[in-house]
Amino acid sequence: MLKKFKYHIAVFFSVIGPGFITAVVDNDAGGILTYSQAGAKYGYLPLWTLLPITLLLIVAQEMSSRMGAVTGKGLSDLIREEFGLRTTFFMMAALVVVNLMNVMANFAGVASALELFHISRYISVPIAALVVWLLIVKGTYASVEKIFLFATVLYVCYIASGILVGPDWKEAALYSVTPVLMWDPDYITILIAMVGTSVAPWMQFYLQAAVVEKGITPKDYAASRIEVIVGCVVMSVIAFFIIVACAGAIWSVKPRDITDATDAALALKPFGPYAYLMFCAGLLNASLFAACIQPLSTAYTVCEGLGFESGVNKKWDEAPIFYWLFTLLIVIGAGFVLIPNFPLIKMILFSQVVNGVLLPFVLVYMILLVNKKQIMHEWVASRAYNVVAWTAVTVMILLTVALVGISARQLVGG
């Protein structure tokens, strides 16, 4: 019995990486701003969304991981093979635009975190961009994954800052299980943004590509599934503490919009230097971490979809399109942050909403693929997974239609 347990533990640690990294990095600069805004403006009310979001994230990530292990192919590769190049092209074009916004958001997070310590963005952003570029271009998948896993540990900063604020834990617990809906465009926008930033489309493409590159097969899949679930739960726990920290520090004093993630950090100063420093450290770590992952995910997606070689284990001359696209995304993403008076915060929140709007389309293709027996064989999705996934698609479409309808009515009325 003990020998079998040790074997399962060894298998788990051999596959840990793709699922855990993908879920945790989802709390990037855009995610931190979205959760901070939710807590600062609406207090504990949005906490109820984290339970269904966690369920949706587990289902989506599990399907991606399963398809990668069973087929040995990336998601955009499967979409191209099954639905044609035209469909893949439009999907990739939308993802590139949204992911570029996310890359900008993360370099903005680097700039914002270090500007609190009086380091100019004209110094911090170019250095961060160079570090990110060297890490991926000069590293291997194994070395890059180890650094990413270390970065996930630093997310504990948000848990610490949330505890130090001393929020109303009873109210937080109550609203975590009490759904609250309001027909208000700002509230609906926040709900869509929370889903979009928690279950972002880029995650499904990156996770499946990473599973393939790591070499996970169906025989490893049981351990890989546990890793995916653990990562999703950790992501939601971190999101919970970001929301309650801002609810306790900002909403409980005076509900308001925040200008950026550093605005949330500054609001923690009255609760002591440790709460403030922890939040800042978390923001810097999350921004750098995601600034690596998101352009990498985009490069994987485009190259797989168009049939080009891709992978961190390949050299530049073996996968030139992959590395040039990765480089271009970093240069453009970092470059926009250096433009004076660029409306970065509006763009960041908008990108998370667009993530939420785009998500149903990605999920539809994933559901159709994971149910194709000729592709997945005995690994097709269960009825329970299909119910959750199709419900999520329906809810996201209804939320988007509601947002457009309410906004249009207010516009006409105004």
Image (cartoon, rainbow, N blue to C red):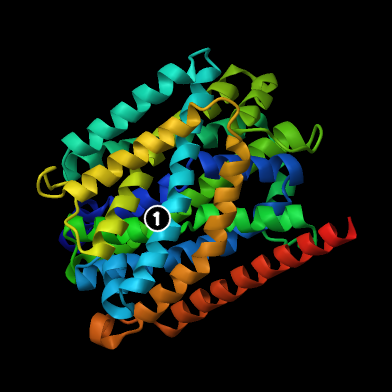
Instruction: Please name whichever residue, 278 or 126, is drawn nearer the observer in this view of the structure.
Output: 126
Instruction: Please name whichever residue, 397 or 68, is drawn nearer the observer in this view of the structure.
Output: 397
Instruction: Please name whichever residue, 3 or 194, is drawn nearer the observer in this view of the structure.
Output: 194
Name the residue: 58% across, 64% down.
Answer: 52
Which residue ends up furthest to the top in the rendered image? 118
Indicate the quadrant containing the C terminus: top left, top right, bottom left or bottom right.
bottom right
Decide: is 173 above or below 129: below
Q: Position of residue 296 (x, y in %)?
A: 31, 47
Name the residue: 68% across, 26% down.
Answer: 267
401 vs 306, left or right, is: right
Name the residue: 18% across, 63% down.
Answer: 4
Which residue ends up furthest to the right in the rendered image? 413
Q: Residues within 10 Å of mark 1 (few under 14, many from 20)?
A: some
Which residue ends up furthest to the bottom in the rendered image? 373
244 vs 79, left or right, is: right
Residue 283 can be seen in this image: no
Residue kind at label 1, given as amino acid type: Val
Decide: is 73 above or below 40: below
In the rendered image, which quarter is residue 232 located in?
A: bottom left
Q: Could you tell me which secondary element the residue under label 1 belongs to?
A: helix
In the rendered image, which quarter is residue 362 located in?
A: bottom left
377 vs 183, left or right, is: left
Q: Position of residue 11 (x, y in %)?
A: 19, 58
**Residue located beneath label 1 in the image:** 230
Q: Position of residue 59 (x, y in %)?
A: 44, 68
Decide: is 347 above or below 386: above
Q: How many marks?
A: 1
57 vs 147, left or right, is: right
Residue 323 can be seen in this image: yes
